[in-house]
Image: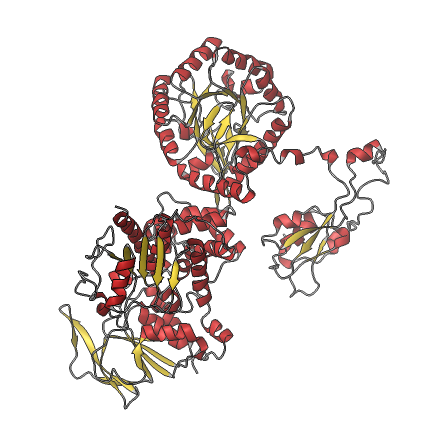
């Protein structure tokens, strides 16, 4: 039976599922409810000098009938007095001594940092998270992501906090930066005990084309917000990988960004995360999602024979290389299963218009099933992505697997294209139709403008 | 010629009785489960007599955790696969789905449920570990949904369990009584094999409990006895001609059909008497077996009919003709059924009355009685202190399911008078807790 106990830099929780610092952790009421439902930890909505928020605050990206696949907010840190929050932290910790309560903090001066650290520790917090990521509202005042984008400033502030902090200090990083390992390293150098990433991404989720203003609309006007939800997971996973693979970043990482179900959590853990933080999925479905997260993670671990999270943390990292280290000899070509094919022809049009014209259609109009033109197929696997039928398009390996040759190898051997018309060009011998053929190609009559 | 040809082979039988809830493919399950909103305090859960956490298992299917979904289902409903197929979901979970308020097709919860449990059964996936033996022994009479569900829970508590089943197969009406287009024999029995292997209760087939000494034996050798005997044979109509050949009960007809499939021969004209779900099933099955004219004769109005609307629509869909406000006076024929003499009825001041002078005769080859099943009063009367209500149903405590004889517990149709498989499962499991509270004192 899987053991989900988690210990992130000394912060213990019964499972790796934490609530992220956000509206769901605005009050002790909510966190109490979450712990009662089974969540392992919670990062309190960022404490500091309370703000005043606007009304409307959120926007969503809906993809067809898939609601809130992306979510953005223009809400700021807590608008509640510190005293209320501290009192509630105490209450929650008294009732749930074994669940992790982490206080997220954002203040300005050294004195303020020192004071608030002591306050939250006295209230019973198990850890502190430094908010260097708020991408709107606070950064304009020199806090939040303004700090996250300045490694020197970040390092300084972390060291201030470490002067007084008795509990572990997590540094939350902003993704609104070119190289996230720079602030990551700065966090380590400043003495941080762990990092968490990603905070929200600067974004505009959509524009009201009748009112000529983006969402969310505040009296006819708007501003950019912080993007999160399932849509941002790929950004988060990449940045997590960058930090986890960096030799200088040797502290635990809490993964944040679009975690909605157990598979997402496993992906984060495989890329090096020790705990995962969830916000959008809770705002969408409530704390009840924890029952799917826990049961799914346990089932996966039992299926694989993993007893603890340590058993598979970072297991995918050794398989992530630089592009130049990928094997150029590996070749796959697409294969369409004619029995499963339903004749939507999406693979045909994707390949024909968007890739390498390696899929053909029968001249018999009643046979709607496309076929692969193997000589043309470069194995890009676009068709397998657009095909709506499970296991219909597979990518079959064509090389014998005995040879390994990377771009790096070829470069060292002087065997790479260097001139514009180099005969070593990868696509030299790849057939491309003549331009004129595009105009003579038969297309459905309803496809003309 | 009727729309359906009388089936001459197993294959033709399967075609005539093609499943109304066929098994989903992986793609179907993925797309359908994507539609579920994951409601808060979902109405479907509240509508389920076994309280399965439906949004959870649907989301588990959607995130590629079908075995996890199977566990979620089996945690609440021992007959997870069977119920997914045979439950009247239209009036239970699917009928409660919030999409009904939005004119969107409700989630196909039943099919998703069978999809997930089907995966566990197919892989013989072990979910549960039975409890350490606690030294107690319980006897269960009847290997139907109530008895088997009770047995599984008792095994989790560590009891030794012996089930005494009169017939050759377990699962009761699931295999012997439910319409063949709802679940196949193989499906019903595969789940039984899966449960028996995992929970380790012992079933003694063709071992009915019939006599006082049978009962005394059980009382001597077991710490408690659970009665899951269900209902008895079809009740008598008490009209002239009932004893003619080719006049029989719906329950008996369906059982014969389930056990013999295409070997059963159904004549050209059949009259089914009754207005409940069993009548619908019997009529529908007769039509699918090639009967040309199947009449469903109910003595009250269509509005008063007890059957679920969707069951009636199903019957009509295969050509059954519903005739209402007709009451059978006599079954006509010499030696064999030749017809039924009816009289028309009407409701006056809340009472059903025959309309004088309105008699008429309808010819037929078979009369199938679907007007109710009797209770097994004979057996029950042999048990000391057993109390039955005026309808012959066993009186039990609503929490513990104990009868008035503290050694005996009961649930299922013998207590309810005739409900669904899911109700028997729910109550059978509650009874297991009642038994444990009692014998572990």
Which residue does the image show at 59% across and 22% down from the upper left? Answer: A184
Q: Is residue B317 left or right of residue A214?
A: left
**Residue B95 seen in the current view:** no
Colour mode? secondary structure
Q: Position of residue A307 (x, y in %)?
A: 52, 37
Q: Position of residue A256 (x, y in %)?
A: 52, 31
In this rendering, the count of numbered labels is 0
Q: Nearer the viewer, residue A154 or B46?
A: B46
Front residue (pair B84, A50): B84
In this view, B87 is above or below B353: above
Relative side of B376 to A140, left or right: left
Q: Is residue A40 above or below residue B353?
A: above
Is A381 above or below relative to A127?
below
Residue B403 relative to residue A9: left or right: left
Q: What percent of the width, then of the height, locates residue B95?
A: 35, 56
Q: Residue furthest top?
A: A111
Residue B202 sits in which quadrant? Answer: bottom left
Q: Residue at x 70, y 47 (%)?
A: A355
């Amino acid at each position: 039976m899987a053991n989900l106990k988690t210990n992130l830099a000394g912060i213990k929780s019964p499972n790796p599922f934490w609530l992220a610092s956000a509206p769901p952790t605005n009050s002790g009421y909510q966190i109490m409810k979450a712990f009662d439902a089974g969540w392992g930890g919670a990062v309190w909505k960022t404490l500091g000098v309370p703000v005043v928020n606007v009304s409307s605050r959120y926007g969503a990206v809906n993809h067809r009938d898939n609601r809130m696949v992306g979510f953005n907010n223009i809400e700021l840190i807590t608008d509640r007095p510190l005293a209320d929050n501290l009192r509630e932290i105490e209450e929650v910790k008294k009732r749930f001594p074994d669940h992790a309560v982490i206080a997220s903090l954002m203040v300005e001066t050294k004195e303020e940092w020192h004071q608030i650290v002591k306050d939250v520790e006295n209230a019973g917090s198990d850890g502190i998270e430094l908010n260097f990521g708020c991408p709107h509202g606070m950064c304009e005042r020199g806090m939040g992501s303004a700090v996250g984008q300045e490694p020197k400033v970040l390092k300084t502030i972390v060291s201030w906090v470490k002067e007084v902090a008795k509990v572990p200090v997590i540094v939350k990083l902003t993704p609104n930066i070119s190289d996230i390992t720079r602030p990551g390293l700065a966090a380590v150098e400043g003495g941080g005990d762990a990092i968490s990433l990603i905070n929200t991404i600067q974004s505009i989720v959509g524009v009201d084309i009748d009112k000529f203003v983006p969402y969310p609309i505040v009296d006819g006007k708007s501003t950019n917000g912080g993007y999160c939800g399932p849509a941002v997971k790929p950004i988060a996973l990449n940045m997590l990988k960058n930090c986890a693979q960096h030799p200088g970043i040797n502290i635990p990482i809490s993964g944040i960004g679009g975690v909605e179900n157990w598979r997402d959590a496993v992906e984060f853990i495989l890329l090096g995360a020790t705990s995962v933080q969830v916000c959008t999925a809770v705002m969408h479905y409530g704390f009840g999602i924890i029952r799917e997260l826990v049961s799914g993670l346990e089932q996966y671990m039992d299926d694989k024979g993993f007893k603890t999270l340590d058993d598979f943390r970072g297991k995918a990292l050794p398989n992530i290389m630089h592009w130049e280290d990928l094997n150029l000899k590996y070749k796959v070509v697409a294969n369409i299963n004619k029995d499963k094919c339903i004749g939507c022809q999406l693979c045909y049009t994707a390949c024909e218009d968007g890739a390498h014209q390696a899929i053909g259609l029968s001249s018999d109009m009643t046979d709607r099933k496309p076929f692969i033109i193997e000589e043309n197929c470069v194995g890009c696997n676009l068709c397998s992505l657009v095909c709506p039928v499970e296991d219909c398009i597979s990518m079959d390996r064509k090389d014998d697997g005995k040879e390994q040759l990377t771009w790096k190898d070829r470069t060292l051997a002087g065997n790479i294209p260097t001139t514009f018309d180099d005969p070593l060009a990868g696509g030299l011998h790849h057939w491309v139709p003549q331009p004129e053929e595009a105009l003579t190609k038969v297309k459905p009559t309803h496809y003309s403008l | 010629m009727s729309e359906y040809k009388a089936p001459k082979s197993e294959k033709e039988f399967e075609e005539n009785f093609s499943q109304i809830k066929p098994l989903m493919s992986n793609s179907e399950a993925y797309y359908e489960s994507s539609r579920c909103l994951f409601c808060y305090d979902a109405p479907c859960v509240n509508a389920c007599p076994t309280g399965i956490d439906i949004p959870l298992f649907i989301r588990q299917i959607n995130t590629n955790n079908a075995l996890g979904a199977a566990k979620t289902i089996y945690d609440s409903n021992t007959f997870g696969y069977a119920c997914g197929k045979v439950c009247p979901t239209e009036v239970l979970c699917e009928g409660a789905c919030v999409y009904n308020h939005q004119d969107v097709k409700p989630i196909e919860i039943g099919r998703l449920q069978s999809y997930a449990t089907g995966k566990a059964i197919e892989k013989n996936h072990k979910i549960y570990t039975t409890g350490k033996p606690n030294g107690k022994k319980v006897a269960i009479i009847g290997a139907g949904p109530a008895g088997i569900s009770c047995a599984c829970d008792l095994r989790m508590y560590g009891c030794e369990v012996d089930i005494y089943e009169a017939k050759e197969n377990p699962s009761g009406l699931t295999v012997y009584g439910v319409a063949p287009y709802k679940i196949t024999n193989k499906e019903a029995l595969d789940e039984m094999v899966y449960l028996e292997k995992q929970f380790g209760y012992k079933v003694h087939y063709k071992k009915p409990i019939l006599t006082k000494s049978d009962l005394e034996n059980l009382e001597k050798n077991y710490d408690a006895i659970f009665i899951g005997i269900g209902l008895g044979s079809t009740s008598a109509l008490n009209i002239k001609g009932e004893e003619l050949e080719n006049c029989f009960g719906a329950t008996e007809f369906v059982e014969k059909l389930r056990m013999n499939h295409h070997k059963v021969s159904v004549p050209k004209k059949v009259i089914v008497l009754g207005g409940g779900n069993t009548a619908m099933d019997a009529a529908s099955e007769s039509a699918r077996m090639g009967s040309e004219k199947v009449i469903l004769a109910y003595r009250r109005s269509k509005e008063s009919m007890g059957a679920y609307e969707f069951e009636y629509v199903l019957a009509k869909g295969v050509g059954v003709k519903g005739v209402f406000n007709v009451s059978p006076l006599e079954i006509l024929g010499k030696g064999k059924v030749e017809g039924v003499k009816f009289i028309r009825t009407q409701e006056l001041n809340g009472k059903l009355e025959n309309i004088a002078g309105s008699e008429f005769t309808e010819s037929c080859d078979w009369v199938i009685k679907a007007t109710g099943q009797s209770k097994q009063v004979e057996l029950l009367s042999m048990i000391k202190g057993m109390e039955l209500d005026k309808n012959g149903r066993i009186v039990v405590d609503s929490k513990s399911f104990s009868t008035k004889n503290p050694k005996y517990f009961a649930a299922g149709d013998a207590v309810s008078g005739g409900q669904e498989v899911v109700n028997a499962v729910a109550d059978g499991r509650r009874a297991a807790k009642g038994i444990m509270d009692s014998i572990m004192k």
